[in-house]
Amino acid sequence: MGGFFEDRRVVVTGGAGFLGSYITEGLRKRGCKNILVPKIEDYDLVNINDIVRMYDDMKPDVVIHLAAVVGGIGANREHPGEFFYKNLMMGVQLIEEGRKRNIEKFVAIGTVCAYPKFSPVPFKEEDLWNGYPEETNAPYGLAKKMLLVQSQAYRAEYGFNSIFLLPVNLYGPGDNFDPASSHVIPALIKKCVDAVEAGLNYIECWGTGGASREFIYAADAAEGILLATEHFNGPEPVNVGAGFEITIKELVEKIAALTGFTGEIRWDSSRPDGQPRRCLDTSRARKLFGFGVKTPFDEGLKATVDWYIKTREICNRKR
Protein backbone atom coordinates (compact mmCIF):
# COMPACT_ATOMS: atom_id res chain seq x y z
CA MET A 1 0.00 0.00 0.00
CA GLY A 2 2.89 2.38 0.81
CA GLY A 3 2.09 6.06 0.92
CA PHE A 4 2.13 8.15 4.09
CA PHE A 5 4.02 5.73 6.36
CA GLU A 6 6.55 4.33 3.92
CA ASP A 7 9.52 6.60 4.67
CA ARG A 8 8.48 8.00 8.04
CA ARG A 9 9.91 6.88 11.37
CA VAL A 10 6.90 5.94 13.51
CA VAL A 11 7.13 5.45 17.28
CA VAL A 12 4.27 3.41 18.74
CA THR A 13 4.23 3.71 22.54
CA GLY A 14 2.51 0.64 23.94
CA GLY A 15 3.34 -1.07 20.66
CA ALA A 16 4.04 -4.37 22.41
CA GLY A 17 0.57 -4.38 23.98
CA PHE A 18 -2.87 -5.53 22.84
CA LEU A 19 -3.89 -2.68 20.53
CA GLY A 20 -0.23 -1.98 19.75
CA SER A 21 0.24 -5.38 18.12
CA TYR A 22 -2.60 -4.58 15.69
CA ILE A 23 -1.20 -1.09 15.01
CA THR A 24 2.31 -2.40 14.25
CA GLU A 25 0.86 -5.09 11.99
CA GLY A 26 -1.19 -2.43 10.18
CA LEU A 27 1.92 -0.26 9.75
CA ARG A 28 3.84 -3.20 8.25
CA LYS A 29 1.00 -3.83 5.79
CA ARG A 30 1.16 -0.15 4.81
CA GLY A 31 4.85 -0.49 3.95
CA CYS A 32 6.28 1.35 6.98
CA LYS A 33 10.01 0.58 7.13
CA ASN A 34 10.74 2.16 10.52
CA ILE A 35 8.34 0.98 13.25
CA LEU A 36 9.86 1.82 16.63
CA VAL A 37 8.44 0.41 19.87
CA PRO A 38 9.85 1.70 23.18
CA LYS A 39 9.71 -1.32 25.51
CA ILE A 40 8.80 -0.69 29.14
CA GLU A 41 12.00 -2.46 30.24
CA ASP A 42 14.06 0.16 28.39
CA TYR A 43 12.00 3.35 28.78
CA ASP A 44 9.74 4.38 31.67
CA LEU A 45 7.55 6.87 29.83
CA VAL A 46 6.36 8.44 33.10
CA ASN A 47 9.96 9.63 33.58
CA ILE A 48 10.99 12.71 31.58
CA ASN A 49 14.62 11.55 31.33
CA ASP A 50 13.52 8.29 29.70
CA ILE A 51 11.21 10.21 27.34
CA VAL A 52 14.09 12.47 26.27
CA ARG A 53 16.31 9.42 25.76
CA MET A 54 13.59 7.67 23.74
CA TYR A 55 13.26 10.68 21.41
CA ASP A 56 17.08 10.90 21.12
CA ASP A 57 17.37 7.19 20.31
CA MET A 58 14.39 6.79 17.98
CA LYS A 59 14.14 10.21 16.25
CA PRO A 60 10.48 9.80 15.24
CA ASP A 61 8.61 11.75 12.60
CA VAL A 62 5.28 10.51 13.99
CA VAL A 63 4.33 9.32 17.50
CA ILE A 64 1.23 7.16 18.03
CA HIS A 65 0.74 7.22 21.80
CA LEU A 66 -1.09 4.07 22.91
CA ALA A 67 0.74 3.37 26.18
CA ALA A 68 -1.56 3.65 29.19
CA VAL A 69 -2.13 2.29 32.67
CA VAL A 70 -5.60 0.76 32.30
CA GLY A 71 -8.03 -1.72 33.81
CA GLY A 72 -11.66 -2.47 34.49
CA ILE A 73 -13.91 -0.96 37.17
CA GLY A 74 -12.12 -2.84 39.99
CA ALA A 75 -8.65 -1.68 38.97
CA ASN A 76 -9.87 1.91 38.52
CA ARG A 77 -11.36 1.90 42.02
CA GLU A 78 -8.18 0.49 43.59
CA HIS A 79 -5.69 2.74 41.79
CA PRO A 80 -7.32 6.11 40.98
CA GLY A 81 -4.22 8.09 41.93
CA GLU A 82 -1.82 5.90 39.98
CA PHE A 83 -4.09 5.87 36.91
CA PHE A 84 -4.39 9.67 36.99
CA TYR A 85 -0.71 10.46 37.55
CA LYS A 86 0.91 7.96 35.21
CA ASN A 87 -1.45 8.52 32.28
CA LEU A 88 -1.24 12.30 32.63
CA MET A 89 2.54 12.45 32.96
CA MET A 90 3.16 10.08 30.06
CA GLY A 91 0.97 11.99 27.65
CA VAL A 92 1.81 15.55 28.69
CA GLN A 93 5.58 14.99 28.63
CA LEU A 94 5.55 13.03 25.36
CA ILE A 95 3.61 15.82 23.64
CA GLU A 96 5.83 18.56 25.10
CA GLU A 97 9.04 16.81 24.07
CA GLY A 98 7.60 16.12 20.62
CA ARG A 99 6.74 19.80 20.25
CA LYS A 100 10.23 20.88 21.28
CA ARG A 101 11.66 18.60 18.59
CA ASN A 102 9.14 19.77 16.00
CA ILE A 103 8.01 16.26 15.10
CA GLU A 104 5.61 16.05 12.19
CA LYS A 105 2.61 14.54 14.00
CA PHE A 106 1.47 13.29 17.41
CA VAL A 107 -1.51 10.96 17.69
CA ALA A 108 -2.99 11.07 21.22
CA ILE A 109 -5.32 8.22 22.12
CA GLY A 110 -8.04 9.18 24.59
CA THR A 111 -10.81 7.04 26.05
CA VAL A 112 -14.59 6.77 26.10
CA CYS A 113 -14.23 7.15 29.91
CA ALA A 114 -13.61 10.87 29.28
CA TYR A 115 -17.29 11.42 28.44
CA PRO A 116 -19.66 12.81 31.09
CA LYS A 117 -21.57 10.20 33.09
CA PHE A 118 -24.94 11.19 31.67
CA SER A 119 -24.01 12.09 28.11
CA PRO A 120 -26.93 11.79 25.67
CA VAL A 121 -26.67 8.54 23.69
CA PRO A 122 -25.06 8.21 21.21
CA PHE A 123 -22.11 10.23 22.56
CA LYS A 124 -21.23 13.12 20.27
CA GLU A 125 -17.82 14.77 20.48
CA GLU A 126 -19.39 18.18 21.19
CA ASP A 127 -20.83 16.76 24.46
CA LEU A 128 -17.37 15.93 25.84
CA TRP A 129 -17.32 18.85 28.29
CA ASN A 130 -20.99 18.83 29.36
CA GLY A 131 -20.52 17.19 32.77
CA TYR A 132 -18.24 15.10 34.99
CA PRO A 133 -17.22 11.55 33.98
CA GLU A 134 -18.56 8.44 35.75
CA GLU A 135 -16.86 8.43 39.16
CA THR A 136 -15.22 4.97 39.11
CA ASN A 137 -13.01 5.85 36.14
CA ALA A 138 -13.02 9.66 36.22
CA PRO A 139 -9.32 10.04 37.21
CA TYR A 140 -8.25 7.93 34.20
CA GLY A 141 -10.74 9.62 31.86
CA LEU A 142 -9.77 13.14 32.92
CA ALA A 143 -6.02 12.43 32.68
CA LYS A 144 -6.57 11.34 29.09
CA LYS A 145 -8.87 14.29 28.35
CA MET A 146 -6.09 16.71 29.33
CA LEU A 147 -4.21 15.51 26.23
CA LEU A 148 -7.02 16.97 24.13
CA VAL A 149 -6.62 20.32 25.92
CA GLN A 150 -2.87 20.17 25.40
CA SER A 151 -3.18 19.16 21.73
CA GLN A 152 -5.54 22.04 20.99
CA ALA A 153 -3.46 24.54 22.97
CA TYR A 154 -0.23 23.49 21.25
CA ARG A 155 -1.86 23.65 17.82
CA ALA A 156 -3.12 27.19 18.60
CA GLU A 157 0.18 28.52 19.98
CA TYR A 158 2.86 26.51 18.20
CA GLY A 159 1.15 25.05 15.12
CA PHE A 160 1.92 21.59 16.51
CA ASN A 161 0.00 18.85 14.69
CA SER A 162 -1.41 16.73 17.53
CA ILE A 163 -4.71 14.91 16.98
CA PHE A 164 -6.95 13.33 19.62
CA LEU A 165 -8.97 10.13 19.10
CA LEU A 166 -11.55 8.56 21.44
CA PRO A 167 -11.75 4.79 20.99
CA VAL A 168 -14.53 2.86 22.66
CA ASN A 169 -13.87 -0.38 24.64
CA LEU A 170 -11.66 -2.77 22.68
CA TYR A 171 -11.86 -6.56 22.46
CA GLY A 172 -10.33 -9.30 20.32
CA PRO A 173 -7.69 -12.06 20.19
CA GLY A 174 -4.66 -11.11 22.28
CA ASP A 175 -6.66 -9.19 24.90
CA ASN A 176 -5.64 -9.07 28.57
CA PHE A 177 -7.30 -11.90 30.51
CA ASP A 178 -5.69 -11.17 33.90
CA PRO A 179 -8.66 -10.89 36.32
CA ALA A 180 -6.89 -8.15 38.32
CA SER A 181 -6.80 -5.74 35.38
CA SER A 182 -8.92 -7.06 32.50
CA HIS A 183 -11.91 -5.33 30.98
CA VAL A 184 -15.41 -6.76 30.83
CA ILE A 185 -15.27 -9.06 27.77
CA PRO A 186 -12.08 -10.97 28.66
CA ALA A 187 -13.12 -11.05 32.34
CA LEU A 188 -16.47 -12.66 31.44
CA ILE A 189 -14.93 -15.10 28.95
CA LYS A 190 -12.45 -16.27 31.59
CA LYS A 191 -15.18 -16.53 34.21
CA CYS A 192 -17.37 -18.71 31.95
CA VAL A 193 -14.50 -20.93 30.75
CA ASP A 194 -13.26 -21.42 34.34
CA ALA A 195 -16.81 -22.33 35.45
CA VAL A 196 -17.17 -24.91 32.65
CA GLU A 197 -13.80 -26.48 33.52
CA ALA A 198 -14.62 -26.58 37.24
CA GLY A 199 -18.16 -27.88 36.68
CA LEU A 200 -19.73 -24.91 38.51
CA ASN A 201 -23.49 -24.43 38.21
CA TYR A 202 -23.43 -20.62 38.53
CA ILE A 203 -21.26 -17.57 37.95
CA GLU A 204 -21.47 -14.21 39.69
CA CYS A 205 -21.32 -10.93 37.77
CA TRP A 206 -20.94 -7.36 38.99
CA GLY A 207 -23.85 -4.92 38.95
CA THR A 208 -27.35 -5.42 37.63
CA GLY A 209 -26.60 -6.32 34.00
CA GLY A 210 -28.64 -3.33 32.88
CA ALA A 211 -25.74 -1.04 31.91
CA SER A 212 -24.91 -0.92 28.20
CA ARG A 213 -21.54 -0.83 26.48
CA GLU A 214 -20.14 -0.47 23.00
CA PHE A 215 -17.21 -2.58 21.83
CA ILE A 216 -14.89 -2.34 18.85
CA TYR A 217 -12.79 -5.19 17.50
CA ALA A 218 -9.11 -4.31 18.04
CA ALA A 219 -8.17 -4.79 14.37
CA ASP A 220 -10.92 -2.33 13.38
CA ALA A 221 -9.80 0.20 16.02
CA ALA A 222 -6.22 -0.03 14.72
CA GLU A 223 -7.42 0.63 11.19
CA GLY A 224 -9.33 3.71 12.39
CA ILE A 225 -6.26 5.07 14.20
CA LEU A 226 -4.02 4.52 11.16
CA LEU A 227 -6.54 6.15 8.80
CA ALA A 228 -6.68 9.17 11.12
CA THR A 229 -2.87 9.31 11.26
CA GLU A 230 -2.75 9.33 7.46
CA HIS A 231 -5.62 11.67 6.65
CA PHE A 232 -6.74 13.78 9.66
CA ASN A 233 -4.96 16.94 10.79
CA GLY A 234 -7.55 18.87 12.77
CA PRO A 235 -8.06 20.14 16.34
CA GLU A 236 -11.41 18.48 17.04
CA PRO A 237 -11.66 15.19 19.01
CA VAL A 238 -12.89 12.20 16.99
CA ASN A 239 -14.74 9.08 18.21
CA VAL A 240 -13.47 5.72 16.98
CA GLY A 241 -16.22 3.17 17.59
CA ALA A 242 -18.66 0.66 16.17
CA GLY A 243 -21.81 2.74 16.75
CA PHE A 244 -23.88 0.14 18.63
CA GLU A 245 -24.61 -0.81 22.24
CA ILE A 246 -25.31 -4.04 24.08
CA THR A 247 -26.37 -4.53 27.72
CA ILE A 248 -24.00 -6.42 29.99
CA LYS A 249 -26.78 -8.97 30.56
CA GLU A 250 -27.03 -9.67 26.81
CA LEU A 251 -23.23 -9.79 26.60
CA VAL A 252 -22.95 -12.41 29.38
CA GLU A 253 -25.61 -14.53 27.68
CA LYS A 254 -23.71 -14.44 24.36
CA ILE A 255 -20.43 -15.35 26.06
CA ALA A 256 -22.08 -18.16 28.06
CA ALA A 257 -23.46 -19.63 24.81
CA LEU A 258 -20.09 -19.40 23.04
CA THR A 259 -18.18 -21.00 25.93
CA GLY A 260 -20.73 -23.72 26.64
CA PHE A 261 -21.63 -22.44 30.11
CA THR A 262 -25.23 -23.45 30.88
CA GLY A 263 -25.43 -22.59 34.59
CA GLU A 264 -27.11 -19.71 36.42
CA ILE A 265 -25.94 -16.10 36.06
CA ARG A 266 -26.19 -14.30 39.42
CA TRP A 267 -25.97 -10.52 39.65
CA ASP A 268 -24.27 -8.80 42.60
CA SER A 269 -26.06 -5.44 42.66
CA SER A 270 -23.88 -4.26 45.58
CA ARG A 271 -21.11 -3.91 42.95
CA PRO A 272 -21.11 -0.89 40.62
CA ASP A 273 -22.49 -0.95 37.08
CA GLY A 274 -20.21 1.92 36.04
CA GLN A 275 -21.51 4.38 33.44
CA PRO A 276 -25.21 3.67 32.71
CA ARG A 277 -24.89 3.63 28.90
CA ARG A 278 -22.11 3.89 26.34
CA CYS A 279 -22.55 4.24 22.62
CA LEU A 280 -20.62 6.56 20.31
CA ASP A 281 -21.75 8.68 17.41
CA THR A 282 -19.20 7.67 14.76
CA SER A 283 -20.26 10.02 11.96
CA ARG A 284 -17.28 12.40 12.39
CA ALA A 285 -14.72 9.62 11.80
CA ARG A 286 -16.62 8.48 8.72
CA LYS A 287 -16.73 12.03 7.35
CA LEU A 288 -13.15 13.08 8.17
CA PHE A 289 -11.20 9.95 7.29
CA GLY A 290 -13.64 7.41 5.92
CA PHE A 291 -13.63 5.01 8.85
CA GLY A 292 -16.24 2.33 9.50
CA VAL A 293 -16.00 -1.03 11.28
CA LYS A 294 -15.69 -4.24 9.26
CA THR A 295 -16.11 -6.92 11.96
CA PRO A 296 -19.66 -7.81 13.13
CA PHE A 297 -19.79 -8.10 16.92
CA ASP A 298 -20.90 -11.75 17.05
CA GLU A 299 -18.10 -12.75 14.67
CA GLY A 300 -15.47 -10.83 16.64
CA LEU A 301 -16.70 -12.21 19.96
CA LYS A 302 -16.52 -15.80 18.68
CA ALA A 303 -12.97 -15.21 17.38
CA THR A 304 -11.96 -13.86 20.81
CA VAL A 305 -13.48 -16.81 22.71
CA ASP A 306 -11.91 -19.31 20.29
CA TRP A 307 -8.49 -17.64 20.61
CA TYR A 308 -8.65 -17.68 24.41
CA ILE A 309 -9.67 -21.34 24.62
CA LYS A 310 -7.00 -22.40 22.11
CA THR A 311 -4.27 -20.34 23.82
CA ARG A 312 -5.29 -21.70 27.21
CA GLU A 313 -5.09 -25.28 25.94
CA ILE A 314 -1.60 -24.65 24.53
CA CYS A 315 -0.48 -23.14 27.87
CA ASN A 316 -1.93 -26.10 29.79
CA ARG A 317 -0.11 -28.58 27.53
CA LYS A 318 3.21 -26.78 28.11
CA ARG A 319 2.96 -27.05 31.90
Image: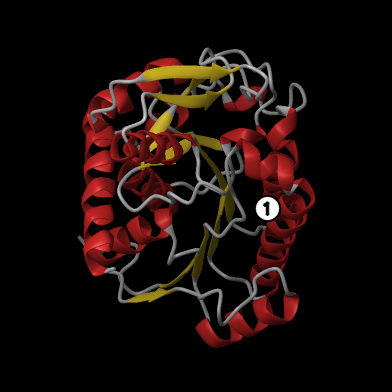
Rendered image quadrant of residue 37: bottom left
Rendered image quadrant of residue 98: bottom right
72 lies above or below 103: above
Give coordinates of residue 126: x percent, y percent. 63, 24
Residue shown at 36% from the left, 30% from the top: 200
Q: Residue 294, can we see it?
A: no
Q: Which part of the image, by quadrant, shows the N terminus?
A: bottom left
Residue shown at 38% from the left, 41% from the top: 190
Which amino acid type is marked by label 1?
Arg
Q: 188 and 144: which one is in front?
A: 188
Residue shown at 30% from the left, 22% from the top: 254
Q: Badge 1: few (under 14), some or many (20 or more) residues near its Cα, within 10 Å?
A: some
Q: Which residue is disc 1 drawn over?
A: 155
Residue shown at 38% from the left, 28% from the top: 242
Q: Which part of the image, by quadrant, shows the C terminus?
A: bottom left
Dot 1 lies on which element? helix
Q: Residue 118, can we see it?
A: yes
